[in-house]
């Protein structure tokens, strides 16, 4: 059958890695959308970026390609940008805290019309 | 397809650990505990990278994510001591749950339904050398832009988070 991989769990197929990445992405999405603390939201974003990296490296390992190492290059770029993003976002959180004594996103409403 | 039994077992153990830790990030009561589980998730993901024979990226993951980002988040929580430490949810909890379940369903469907062009490649041998060549030949421009971006982000973070001196505040 072509849809499901032969579900003998003793071989590792691309689909299984993709599903693990998908589960991680869904958890990250849930955390990013539901948490009240800005730092909690950032944790969700980092989880999503990790899930994307898992799928990138899975494709690099399993998919036919003339330059298979490119997946690793993309993953390294994602990690770089994620580090920059985390630094700026946490600095923003600290700056907001200094003015408002809170980092809860439902209390930071100065831009609300 | 990987059929080395040890690698497959390692993958399932690492995946279970990673997913459970990620769930604990969502479920933990205390924000500090959530960060610790997040660091564990990062280490588990690094293990999955090793299973996928991405040794360099795995090392970078442990260094930058588990090390730097984990410490940065712990610091950010400790620098906001008066803020709510409960890892609480907004009113969007239920819609977020539904949306992420839908996204997961779509991803699983697409992953299983697509005919992937699977190659019979063996595991990569050490990737650091070929990664370095890729960075300095076809990807030289993005590589340099990334370094400029990192410098800009670092300066931006310092500017955003420093205390305003008294004389500037009076002006």
Image (cartoon, rainbow, N blue to C red):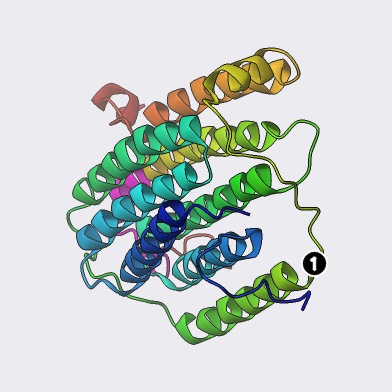
Q: For this view, does A60 lie left or right of residue B44?
A: right
As drawn, is B123 to the left or to the right of B85? right
* The image quarter in which residue B160 lies: top left
Question: Vertically, is B23 above or below B64?
Answer: below
* Quadrant into which the C terminus of chain B falls: top left
Q: Residue at x 63, y 31 (%)?
A: A73
Rendered location of residue A59, percent (x, y)? 67, 48
Magenta span includes A95: yes
Which residue carries the number 1 mark?
B114
**Front residue of B167 and A4:** A4
In the picture, the quarter occupied by the N terminus of chain B is bottom right
Numbered label tally:
1
Instruction: Let me know if residue B71 appears in the view.
Output: yes
Which quadrant holds residue B13? bottom left
- Tell me which corner region of the image, top left, top right, bottom left or bottom right, holds residue B123: top right
Return the chain for callout 1. Answer: B
Residue A83 at what x, y percent from top left? 46, 36
Of residues A101 and A90, which is closer to you in this image? A90
On the image, the x and y values in percent for residue B140 come to: 70, 15
Asked if residue B165 is among those painted magenta in the image, a careful observer would answer: no
- SS of the residue at dot 1? loop
In the image, B58 versus B4, the foreground residue is B4
- Is residue A101 visible in the rendered structure shown here? no
Q: Residue sitting at 47 percent across and 33 percent down?
A: B55
Determine the residue positioned at 63% across, 80% down: B102
Depth check, front residue: B98 or A10: A10
Query: Quick check: A29 left or right of B7?
Result: right
Residue span colored magenta: A93-107
């Amino acid at each position: 059958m072509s849809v499901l991989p032969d579900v003998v769990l003793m071989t590792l197929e691309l689909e299984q890695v993709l599903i693990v990445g998908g589960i991680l992405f869904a958890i990250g999405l849930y955390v990013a959308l539901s948490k009240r603390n800005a730092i909690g939201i950032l944790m969700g974003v980092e989880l999503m970026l990790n899930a994307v990296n898992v799928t990138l490296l899975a494709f690099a390992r399993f998919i036919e390609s003339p330059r298979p190492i490119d997946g690793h290059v993309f993953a390294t770029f994602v990690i770089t940008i994620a580090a920059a993003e985390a630094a700026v976002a946490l600095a923003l959180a600290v700056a907001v805290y200094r003015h408002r004594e809170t980092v809860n996103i439902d209390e930071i409403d100065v831009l609300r019309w | 397809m990987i059929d080395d039994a040890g690698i497959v077992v390692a993958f399932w153990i690492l995946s279970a650990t990673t997913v459970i830790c990620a769930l604990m990030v969502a479920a933990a009561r205390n924000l500090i505990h959530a960060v610790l589980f997040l660091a564990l998730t990062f280490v588990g993901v690094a293990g999955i990278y090793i299973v996928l024979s991405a040794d360099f990226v795995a090392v970078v993951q442990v260094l930058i994510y588990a090390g730097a980002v984990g410490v940065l988040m712990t610091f950010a929580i400790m620098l906001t001591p008066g803020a709510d430490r409960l890892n609480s949810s907004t009113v969007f909890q239920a819609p977020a749950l539904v949306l992420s379940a839908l996204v997961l369903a779509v991803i699983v469907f697409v992953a299983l339904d697509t005919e992937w062009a699977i190659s019979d490649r063996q595991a990569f041998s050490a990737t650091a050398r070929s990664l370095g060549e890729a960075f300095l030949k076809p990807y030289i421009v993005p590589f340099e832009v990334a370094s400029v971006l990192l410098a800009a982000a670092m300066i931006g973070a310092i500017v955003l988070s420093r205390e305003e001196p008294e004389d500037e505040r009076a002006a």
